[in-house]
């Protein structure tokens, strides 16, 4: 079962992507993995950005077993460890050595490092450069007056919250939407045709196969998960729609800076997520932080 609309299906609704290049972070498992599969099956060359080479190679082998073979696109591992922003810059430099055009990329550090290449590609005739940021409806659970002024704000532990880890997760998803909207505003102001979209993938089962889960947890909770949560293949529908749907290319102004719900439906995030002053505060801190890390 599931609550996803059947209006969009990557298998039938995505165009031929044989001339497209895609870079996806966190793509050796879960929604990222499924997004790789949807796009590569339509001919795209996809760079699987992941930290662990063996896991990435296992994921690529699994893709081939599931039907990624001759006639489909190509999947290539790109080493990337996002614990340190300097690693993102290194990966971006390695990425630019390998290709001349980028279609989709989804990480703000990589976007910053790759901006010259994105701008160059966007200037080409009939180009359609998109930046897709995976956010979440979790941003709606953020309360109070969140700030992104400094590292202390980013590292807040929320010890008094009912679930500190979930609260931090929601804060990061709010940051995803704020950053995407601010990036779109700046690109549009500069006259760039690049489209930036943030997406909520829906309620997706990305944890049932984790080895860390106890047998008791799986026995007690997993029947509920399977009933109400979608498989990652469907969880990637909205990401695939944002990345490669012809509809987005035909109606760029409609989708620029938007927040999408499954499947590909424009939705309004919270007032907090639309706060331009908060988005600028986040942007300014990220720029300052990266500069301090040696990324000019």
Image (cartoon, rainbow, N blue to C red):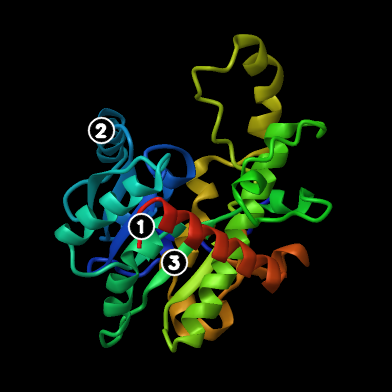
| Towards the viewer: 31 or 170 | 170
Q: Which residue is mark 3?
A: 131
Of the residues under marks 3 and 2, which one precedes in the sequence? 2
Q: Mark 1: which secondary structure?
A: loop
In the image, taking residue 8 as reference, residue 228 lies left or right, namely: right
The residue mark sitting in front, 3 or 1, is 1
Q: Mark 3: which secondary structure?
A: strand
| Towards the viewer: 130 or 15 | 130
The residue mark sitting in front, 1 or 2, is 1
In the rendered image, the vertical position of residue 72 relative to residue 296, given as above or below: above
The answer to whether marks 3 and 1 mark residues whose Cβ atoms lie closer than 8 Å is: no
What residue is rendered at 43% in x and 65% in y? 243
| Towards the viewer: 101 or 224 | 101
What residue is rendered at 36% in x and 40% in y? 81
Kindly indicate the quadrant of the structure image that contains residue 229: top right
The answer to whether marks 3 and 2 mark residues whose Cβ atoms lie closer than 8 Å is: no
Of the residues under marks 1 and 2, which one precedes in the sequence? 2
Q: Which residue is mark 1?
A: 295
In the image, taking residue 99 as reference, residue 266 lies left or right, namely: right
In which quadrant will I find the C terminus? bottom left
Query: Real-space Cα distance between discs 1 and 2?
Result: 25 Å
Picture disc at residue 53: 2
């Amino acid at each position: 079962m599931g609550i996803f609309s059947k209006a969009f299906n990557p298998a039938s609704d995505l165009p031929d992507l044989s001339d497209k290049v895609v870079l996806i972070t966190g793509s050796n498992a879960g929604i990222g993995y499924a997004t790789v599969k949807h796009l590569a099956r339509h001919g795209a060359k996809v760079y699987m950005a992941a930290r662990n080479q063996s896991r990435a190679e296992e994921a690529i082998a699994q893709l081939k077993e599931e039907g990624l073979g001759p006639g489909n696109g190509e999947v290539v591992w790109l080493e990337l460890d996002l614990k340190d922003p300097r690693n993102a810059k290194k990966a971006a430099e390695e990425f630019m050595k390998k290709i001349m055009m980028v279609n989709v990329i989804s990480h703000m550090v990589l976007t910053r490092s790759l901006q010259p290449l994105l701008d160059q590609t966007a200037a080409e005739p009939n180009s359609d450069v998109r930046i897709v940021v995976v956010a979440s409806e979790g941003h709606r659970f953020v309360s109070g007056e969140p700030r992104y002024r400094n590292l202390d704000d980013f590292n807040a532990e929320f010890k008094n919250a009912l679930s500190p880890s979930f609260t931090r997760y929601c804060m990061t998803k709010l940051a995803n939407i704020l950053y995407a909207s601010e990036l779109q505003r700046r690109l549009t102001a500069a006259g760039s045709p690049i489209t930036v979209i943030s997406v909520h993938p829906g309620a997706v089962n990305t944890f049932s196969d984790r080895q860390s889960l106890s047998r008791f947890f799986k026995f007690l909770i997993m029947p509920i998960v399977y009933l109400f949560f979608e498989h990652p293949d469907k969880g990637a529908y909205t990401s695939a729609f944002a990345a490669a749907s012809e509809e987005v290319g035909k109606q760029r102004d409609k989708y620029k800076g938007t927040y999408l719900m499954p499947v590909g439906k424009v939705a309004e995030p919270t007032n907090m997520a639309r706060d331009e002053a908060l988005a600028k505060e986040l942007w300014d801190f990220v720029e300052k932080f990266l500069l301090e890390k040696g990324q000019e």
